[in-house]
Image (cartoon, helix red, strand yellow):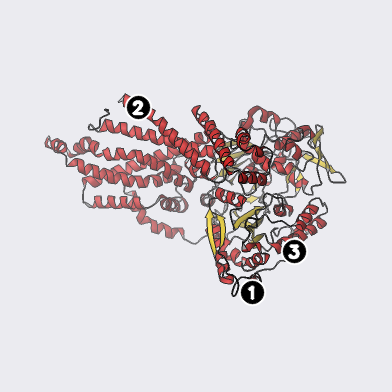
Amino acid sequence: MLRYALRRLLGLFPVLLVIFTLSFVLMRAAPGGPFDAEKPVPAEVKRNLELKYHLREPWCEARFLPALREGLEPAVERAVRAEQPWASRAEKLCTGLFQYGWMLANYATGDFGPSYKYKDRSVNEFIAAGLPVTIQLGLVAMCFALFIGLTAGLIAAIRQNGWADHAAMGMALLGISIPNFVLGPLLILVFALTLVWLPPARWGSWEYMILPGFTLGSAYAAYIARLTRGGMLEVIRQDYIRTARAKGLSERLVILRHAVRGGMLPVVSYLGPAMAGLFTGSIVIERIFNIPGMGRYFVDAALNRDITLAMAVVVVDAIFLLVANLLVDLALGLLDPRVRYEE
Amino acid sequence: MPSRPLLLLALPLLLLAGCRNEGDTFGPAQRTRSDNTYLFGGGAEPESIDPGLAYDSPGLEIARNLFEGLMRYDPRTLEPLPGVAERWEKSEDGRRYLFRLRPDARWSNGRPVVAEDFVYAWRRVLDPRTAAQYAALLWDIENGKAFAEGRAAAEAVGVRALDERTLEVRLERPVPWFLDLLAFAPFYPVPREAVEAHGIRWTRPENIVTNGPFHLGSWQISYQIELVRSPTYWDREKVSLDRAVAIISDDNHAMVRLFRAGALDWLGADNRPPVEYLSFLENKKDYRANPELGSYFYWFNLRDDRGDSPLRDKRVRQALNLAIDKEAIVRFVTRGGERAARTVVPDLFERFGYRPPAAPGHDPERARRLLAEAGYGPGGKPFPTLQLTYNTDDRHKQIAEAIQQMWREELGIRVALENQEWKVFMNNRNEGFFEIARAGWIGDFQDPYTFLAQFLSDSEMNEARWSNADYDRLVREALTEEDDARRYALYAQAEAILIDELPVLPLYYYSKQTLIGSWVEGWYPNSQDIHPLRDIRLVR
């Protein structure tokens, strides 16, 4: 099992490299740059900015478009590029390769580089500030989801086709169908603005975590409830449960000691993708509740063409998801005697 | 699980309760906190709070309260008041200033603010290695542009310390609004010792040294920035607040909710109530809508590579302008106190004596005549479908749809609307890949020049690539005219050309909507939405 875990861990690196490369290519291919704004900065200043942030490489310019070194005016540069489209493309490709190498070298030392938008900060600081909040939010949501989902699923399975089952599964259907951008504002309206029990936005002590955690977790609670119910119903009909019952164990023990372990398997394998969902779902929740997590940079950094920040968010998330999936696979091995880690 | 059915049952009841009769304020009628801490919306995470690098308005707002330039803003009129400069002299030709610094101006580390601090700060902004986005504002200083382009040494720049308390500034040409500029962040002094010791980390709370009314207490990314009253500021007796906290968020819905719950004293300059709130807020005591120094308009693409575009005919542009009922747009679409625009320079300079040129209003009859003269319409050529591009945003979309409808009904012209993500939009507009494109312009200082400069032939911001020699000559002549009346007369002549030629279609002048608690004193509505914290007081 240790060998298996190690092999999987080593396997993460090529996957990360592919993710890094793909997202870099996509970011570079998007039109517009980080320094385009309604009030354009003077050409000289923009050039300096681009040099500073490796969006321009003097070596590439000299090699492919020597005319650019003199012509600073954007109009002149446009004309030069239009005249020599192939040289211009080659120059861009060359600059891109330089930038790719520069970022990759940074990543190798654990440095995500400077932010293109936030001039006083490095990307590492944004991740360091945002990631714990996003993880915290995800964990709170996961707790809500597991607690509500497991309880509801168990009750529904035990009282199959009773009113409790129908009520729980009805709720689950609602939970799956109500999107979190509807549920969030509704909860705010009720608990923050009308009853004034909980704060309407931001992040801090435990009161701040309840509404966003519940909103984010609700859909997962619903899935988990359905999965638990399904898993339990399947397990309860197995021979070993009948054996346990025949041995005279109390129903409580049969369910909690024997059935739950098997019934949980679908839930556990669902936790990997659920982590992914919690992470991407937090983009919306972080906006609604104005939470200073990392999810907001997914969208904002890409829109701002803040290449370094956007890529760091993608890579950190990828690491998080890959590790979460690995942990889930390992946990399945512990829980399910049918899973083996042999070649 | 029982919480959820209960909740769902309770929802309709609670929603009804939410619609109960409202008071005459949107937020709390009384302040809900008793501390002397002012909480305000700070907008998005600032790009930088370094006065030399700050470029976006959240960053400039923080820098403005941490640092003080030679001048500072009057909270009512935004006229320059003496800041670090105690008094000053201007030469006859308007090209040389002598500033005498006040002896009690101090940095937060106790060191006096000296003339050399300004010399260092200004050269730093100009220095190409700093890559400051506002550097061009300092190009009017003698050899400023030359130094920025590497053609002159730093020592040649026209700013010198004659002694510790005397600063001499030489300009390339007289700049009528130079004193106004001195209250703006790129002109603030910066502490050399901190900048050189800590690099980009010098603006962190643990490293920063400031000379303004406030000091930086803490800075939590995308969460809040805390400002604490500075014990070393020369006018500290006048500062009433103990602390001020900028709550960072660009989500206007969340901020409006925080205000309603009493967790904000002021919604902030960079947050505004979402448009769907406006009619509800109209009669609330804590709601304000003030004229803002900004214009909303559409560029027509007149570039040479668009040879056969009907827009290149002036009469077509005039017809498109006349066919729009701008009053209807501000009344029914934007709804936040905006004013319909006939010209590009906002209607805020009239109090200084600016007389804008006469411009026609809504006149669909004349619009149809002009279009027929240009050879379109019944009996003429069919008018091709126009492409109108705007950046993705509900408000821009609603305005574009209103105009689309007006042009179709009044002129029979079809318009295809296209929204683009912001950076894509900016790229396409700069490169000329558009036919008609939305634009907004917020003035940097209180002179019409800040609006008129973008239509000069050689301006990179001139997206239409419109060019008019008379216009260029008039604006350039005005540029160095120090007498306000004569300068304004020249601007008015220039603007008359602009609204006859219409490289842009002016739509409305911005208005700034905000929410401010009735307990806040020292907050005065003004056209650039600048409200220095040193003047804010919390009462009751």
- Looking at the rendered structure, the secondary structure element under dot 1 is helix
Q: Three-letter amino acid code at disc 2?
A: Arg
Q: Chain of mark 1?
A: B
Q: Where residue B46 sits in the image (x, y, percent)? A: 59, 42
The numbered mark at residue A7 is 2
Q: Mark 2: give few (<14), some (14-19) or many (20+) Cα within 10 Å.
A: few
Nearer to the camera, A227 or B71: A227
- Of A155 and A65, the residue lying toward us: A65
Relative side of A326 to B166, left or right: left
Residue B428 circle label = none
Q: List the residue tagged with mark 3.
A: B357
| Helix, strand or loop under label 3 | loop
The residue labelled by disc 1 is B365
Is B85 on the left or on the right of A271, as rendered? right
Report the chain holding disc 2.
A
The reply to whether label 2 and label 1 mark residues of one chain is no
Give the residue at x 56% y 57%.
Answer: B389
Of circles 3 and 2, which is in front?
2
> Could you tell me residue A206's position as x and y percent?
44, 40
User: Which amino acid, by three-letter code, is at mark 3?
Assistant: Pro
Type of amino acid under label 1: Glu
Task: Tell me the distance, in whole angstroms, between the alpha carbons under discs 3 and 2.
Answer: 77 Å
Label 2, secondary structure: give it: helix
Q: Quadrant of residue A228?
A: top left
Query: Going by the image, does A260 lie left or right of A95?
Result: left
